[in-house]
Image (cartoon, helix red, strand yellow):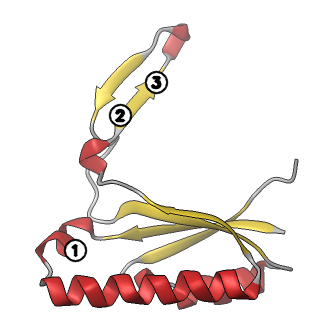
Amino acid sequence: MQYMLMIHDDGAAAQCAPQAEVQKFMAAYEAYTGAMAQAGILRAGERLRPPSSATTVRAPGGKAEVVNGPYAELKEQFGGFYIIDVPDLDEAIKWAARCPSAQHGAVEVRPIWPR
């Protein structure tokens, strides 16, 4: 079954972190991504640009309303995702717990509807 691991963390804190700490964090993500690829469970994954680059679109009554920036100002921001294919939720949770952002943020695990 496929699951999306949605990474939520404090993007502002990352911008203020010392460069050495950022490099260590990015190396941890490279190792994590490599472990998922080696296990054969990784289907997709990407890091997102900051919420300030977002565009929010709503279309009440079919007319598009566009707002630059994020929908809401939150301390924890959606910063990236992975799509994995594992046997069950327990296995997805194990992989989510290994995510570097799980140590200081949150990783939401959500099943994907099959096609």
Q: How far is the residue under mark 3 from the one under mark 1?
A: 30 Å
Which residue has dot 3 on it?
58
Pointer 2: residues within 10 angstroms few (<14), some, or many (20+)?
few
Q: Residue at (75%, 78%) from the top-left corner?
A: 41
Which residue has dot 2 on it?
55
Q: State whether residue 113 is above or below residue 26.
A: above
Q: Nearer the viewer, mark 2 or mark 3?
A: 2
Which residue has dot 1 on it?
14
Q: How far is the residue under mark 2 from the one under mark 1?
A: 22 Å
Coordinates of residue 63 in the picture (x, y in percent): 48, 8
Q: Residue at (28%, 57%) from the top-left corner?
A: 74
Q: Amino acid at mark 3?
A: Arg
Q: Residue at (55%, 90%) from the top-left corner?
A: 98
Coordinates of residue 8 in the picture (x, y in percent): 42, 68
Residue 93 in view in this figure? no
Coordinates of residue 53 in the picture (x, y in percent): 28, 43
Label 2, secondary structure: give it. strand
